Amino acid sequence: MELAPSKIVLPPLREDIRLIPGESERDGAPAWVLQDPARNRFFRIGWAEFELLRRWRLGDGDAVIAEVNRHTPLHVEEGQLRALLEFLARNQLLLGRGRGYRDRLRAMAQAGRPSPGQWLLHRYLFFRIPLVRPHAFLQASWPWVRPLFSRAFLRLLLACVLLGILLAAQRWESFSATFLHFQTLEGWLLFAIALSFAKIIHELGHAYMATRFGLRVPTMGVAFLVLWPVLYTENSEAWKLPERRKRLLIGAAGMLAELSLAVFALLLWSFVEDGPLRSALFMLATSTWLMTLLVNLNPFMRFDGYYLLSDLLGFANLQDRAFALARWRLREWLFGLGRPPPERHPPRLARFLVWYAWGTWIYRFFLFLGIALLVYHLFFKALGLFLMLVEIGWFIGRPLLREMGEWLKSGEEMRWNRRSIRTLSLVAGLIGLAFLPWDHHSDVPGLVVHPRQNRIFAAEAGRVAELHVARGQPVTAGEPLLRIESPDLDQRIEQARQELRIVALEMERKAIDEVSLEYRGILEQRRAEARSSLDGLLERKERLRVNATLDGEIAYLDSSLVVGRWIDTRTPLLRIVDDRTLEVHGYLDGEQRRRLGVNAAARFYADDPDLTPLAMRLTHIEEGSLRQLATPYLASTFGGPLAVRKDGSGGLISETPLFRAVFRPVGDVEGGFEQVVRGELRVAAEARSPLLHFLRRAASILVRESGF
C-alpha cells in the first residue's frame, strides 16, 4: 500500500541560526531564544515550537507532528506547524533555493520597503547613525574597568555620597548659588558639554555591563529624535541571557553609571575653586541624572524604563501583547463579540496590561500632538502646517482608522446584545449631536463699561479739609463731595487783598486834585490788576470745593483719602458712575457676527461668582473690525480670552479680526457693577451644527496659517 504524500513540505532551516535556552514562562513552561546572527535579531519561542524545530530535519510536516506527539507530553496540531512555518518564512529563517524562493524574498523585500513619503516621515522623526563598533575596545579595556563592578567600589560609592552630602550641606548657600553661573552663553555651553559627557558615561555603563556578562556590543552611535541627538548602545544580545537579574542590570547600568558620576561630582565640588570646572561638577551632581531618570524610567517609550518593566514582569514584547489584550477588551466592551482573548493571564496581570496599554496610548497621543506642534514651529508656515497634519494623520488618525476598520470586519460576528445596542445608541447619539443644528447660543467675551462716568482729581495741591461721601454712596449732580484747602493759595489771596487795601488807602490820603493825572492812572491800573488777581485766586479756591458732576454712585474712593491728608493733582480721588448707562461690550469673531442679530437676547455672567447674572439685549454691532484692543482686560497677555500679541509700541494686536457689539441691560441692575467687570455673554444665535462649525473653523485656521 502506497502512503499519501504529506500536506506540508518543510524547507530546510538556515544553518547559522541558533537556539539558546531562555527564561521559563510565567507558568513554568520552558522557553528558548532563536537567534538570527546575520541580522542580530532574537525571537522568543515556546516548548512546542522548540520540539518542532528539533525535528525539522525530517522535512515532512506530518512526520514532525507525529514525532512530537509520540515522544513528548505535548499535543501539537497542524495549525501550530503552519503558523511556525509562516513565522520562519516571514523572518527569512528558512534556506531556500531556486527562482521561486528568490522571487518570494524579492516580493517580501518590496512589501517591507517604505514609500518615499513614509521613509522621509520616519527619517525626520527618528533615525540612527552607527558611529563605532566598540567590541574590541570594550574587551581590551575591560580589565581596567572590572574593579568598578566590585563590592569594594560599591562601598566606596556609599562613603563618597555620604561625605559629599555632608560637605555640600555645610556650604549650602554657595552650592545653590552655583546655578547662577548658567545664566550666560558660556554657562549654557558648559551645560551642553557636561550633559554630553554624562550621556557618554551612560552608554558606556550599558556596554560594560553587557561585556561583563560575556555579550557582544555590535554598535554604538547617535540617534535623532525629531532632529534632537541622543546616544544609543545596541544591547540586543541581552536576550541570550536566561537570568532575568542580568538583563535588569544591563538595562539599569546606564542610570547607575550616571548616578555614580553624580556622586563623585558632588564630592569633588567641595574641593574645587569657583570657575567653569566647579559649575560643570554642579551640573553633573544635580540636573543631569535627574533628567536621565525622568526620561529613561518612562515605561511608555522604548527606553530603559520599558525594558526594565518588561524584565521585572518577565513579560517579553510587553507593549505589543498589552496592546493586543487592550484592543480585545475594548471590542468586547463595545460589541460583546464573545471572542477568546489573545492570551490568558491571571486577572491582576490582565488588568495591569490593559491599564498600561491605555496609559501608553494616552501618552503617545499627547506626545505625537506635541511633536506635531514642534515640527510646525520648526519650519516655515506652509511646510510646518503640512508636516503637522501628516504627523497627526499618520500617528494619531491612522491607528484610529485601522481599529475602526477591524470593527467593520467583525460585522458578521456582531449580534444584538446589551453592549452592542448601547454602543450603537451612543454612536448614533454622537452623530446626531455632531450634525444636527442644536446649538442655539454663542458665547462671547464681554466687559462691563459705563459710558457716563467721571474721575475726579484735585484742581490744586493741598490738604483735605472736608469729606462728605463714602464709597458706594449715591450722589446727585451739584452735591458737595469734599473740600480741599491750600495754604499757599490762601496766602496769595490774602496778599492780593492786602494790595487792594494799600491802593485804596493811598488814593484816600491824597486829594484827587493834588494827584497828577499820570499818577492817578498808575493807581487805577494797580487796583485793576490786584482785583483781577484776587478774582482769579478766588475762582481757583472755589474749584477746591468738589461737587458731583452727574447723578450716580461713588464707584471708587481712594482708601487713604481722609481729612488732613495732603494730595497732589495727579492722583485720582474718586470716580462717579451712572449705573443707568451700564453697557457690556462684547467682541465677536466673523462667524459670531454672522450668527448674531440686533435685539438678540443675552445673559452676562461675570467672572466674579458673587455678582448676579444680567439679562441683556444686543443693541448695536460695529461695521468695521478691530485689530487693536483699546483696553487690556480681555487680552490673553493679561489672562483674558482674546488672543493678542504686542506690537513694537506695546499695542495689543488681535490675532483675528474682531467686531465690537454693544449690549444693554433689560430691567434694573443690582449693585456690584460699578467697576470694570470681565465676564462672558451667552447670546441667542442662529442654530448651527457643531461638526460643521468645527470644520469651518479648521478650514479657516488652515488657510490663515498656511499663509495663503
Image (cartoon, rainbow, N blue to C red):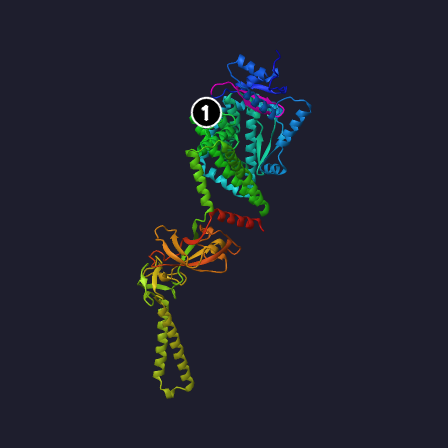
Along the line of sight, the residue nearer the viewer: 149 or 651: 651
Taking the image as shown, residue 533 lies to the left or right of residue 624, namely left
Mark 1 packing: few (<14 Cα in 10 Å), some, or many (20+)?
some
Residue 58: name its quadrant.
top right
How many numbered discs? 1
Q: Is residue 134 magenta?
A: no
Between 96 and 573, the residue placed more toward the observer is: 96
Amino acid on which the number 1 mark rests in the picture: His
Residue 482 position in % (x across, y down):
33, 64
The answer to whether residue 255 is seen in the rendering is no
Q: Quadrant of residue 577?
A: bottom left
Q: Is residue 268 above or below residue 633?
A: above
- Say which of 321 and 167 sits in front: 321
**Residue 457: image location, x then y, percent:** 39, 63
Image vertical order of residue 71 relative to residue 672, above or below: above
Say whether residue 35 is magenta: yes
Relative image position of residue 131 (x, y in whole percent): 63, 31
Q: Residue furthest front?
A: 1
Q: Is residue 661 left or right of residue 464?
A: right
Q: Is residue 343 visible?
A: yes
Residue found at the very far top of the displayed protein: 1
Residue tagged 1: 345
Q: Farthest residue in the bottom direction?
A: 513
- Tell me residue 29's x, y (percent): 49, 18
Q: Is the N terminus in the top left, top right, bottom left or bottom right quadrant?
A: top right
Of 79 and 625, the residue lying toward us: 79
Start-end of magenta stretch: 27-46
Q: Is residue 541 above or below residue 391?
A: below
Secondary structure found at label 1: loop
